[in-house]
Amino acid sequence: MERYARHQELIGAAGQTALAKARVLVIGTGGLGSPTLFALAAAGVGTLGIVDDDVVEISNLNRQLLHSDAFINQPKTDSAKQTIGRFNPDIQLKTYSQRFDADLAEQIVPEYDMLVDCVDNYATRIAANACAVKYNKTLIEGGIEGMSGFVQIVIPGKTACFNCFGVEDNEIYRQVLGASTGIIGNLQALECIKQLTGIWDGSYSYIAVDFRQCSMERMFLEPNDDCGCKK
Amino acid sequence: MNISVSAMGNIKEFIPDEMQLELETPVSLSELKVIAGIPKERNVSFVVNGRVQKGGYTVSDHDDVKFLMLVGAG
Ligand SMILES: [Zn+2]
């Protein structure tokens, strides 16, 4: 299709078909979820599930490009659905205006191929990771604080998961530049697309980005032997 | 024992380059973090010889320890 002509040589016809057939669940439509959803829709991912229980607030608009003034106090899922629906009408969109927890995960996660975690708190990250491991789904994790961010590719049983770190519900520093969330969210979408099209070479599973120094580093993380994700 | 220590991302603020630490006694990763100069209150995660470990893991001679930043906003 002409819409996808400019990346056709990079992923091939088989890659485009894989994207069209793919079902990706994006958890969170904020600073990370906005660029992730735009990039996945632009690439032609066939079905996008969108989870968010928040409403749009004015303080979101320094970074959350899915939303705008017209949607203040409206559910973010409504705003996301309208924005992405206009951007690429060929994509099937399913929205869930609820908090992502174990109950919702049980209902919806089995119908998706891959999860992208774009949330802003450790509790939901831990919940998303647990269901990725439980349902054996690849999870693209991403986070940001201040001038630093990371992306982690979680393939249960193969790469380290988020629980391998033993993270607890830590305090979060919430200052962030929208341009930085754009980089991490797009990187999450890129790694998701690489997984779906078979481009990922398997040599790394963690990317650290330091925006102040303008540096990006990567490494492969082996799972913690004591974590339940290791089969 | 000799331990190799390095950092990724913004933890390089405290450990810009890989360095060797000589330890008299075995220590946990949480203790090593402070010995290496990272403030106790700073959230980090730990990788030893390429494998993710928790703070209670006790380091062994010749371990290659990497400190990763831990960030959670979105
Ligand atoms: Zn794990």
Image: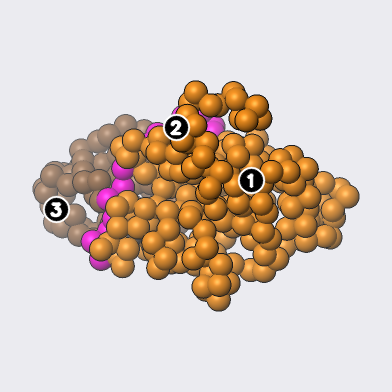
Chain colours: A orange, B brown
If you read the primary sequence from the N terminus, does the residue marked by circle 1 or circle 2 appear first? Answer: 1
Please indicate whether residue A8 sits to the left or right of residue B31 in the image: right
Q: How far across and how far down the image is residue A201, in percent?
A: 34, 35
Ligand 1 within 8 Å, label 3 CB: no
Whether residue A219 is in magenta: the answer is yes
Circle 1 packing at 10 Å, graded few (<14), some (14-19), many (20+), is: many
Circles 1 and 2 in contact, beta carbons < 8 Å: no
Please indicate whether residue A114 sits to the left or right of residue A60 in the image: left
Asked if both marks, 3 and 2, belong to the same chain, the answer given is no
Report if residue A35 is visible in the image: no
Q: Residue furthest bottom?
A: A103
For image coordinates 72% across by 62% down, the residue present is: A54
Q: The C terminus of chain A appears in which quarter of the rendering?
A: bottom left
Mark 3 to mark 1 CA distance (whole Å): 44 Å
Q: How far across and how far down the image is residue A128, in percent?
A: 50, 63
- Give, as a three-letter code, the residue at label 1: Leu
Q: Which residue is mark 2?
A: A216
Q: Secondary structure at mark 3?
A: loop
Q: Which residue is mark 3?
A: B60
- Give, as a three-letter code, the residue at label 3: Ser
In the rendered view, tell whether residue A101 sits above or below residue A181: below
> In this orientation, which residue lies closer to the viewer: A212 or A83?
A83
Mark 3 to mark 2 CA distance (whole Å): 29 Å
For image coordinates 14% across by 56% down, the residue present is: B25
In the rendered view, tell whether residue A141 sits above or below residue A129: above
Give the number of the disc on residue A37: 1
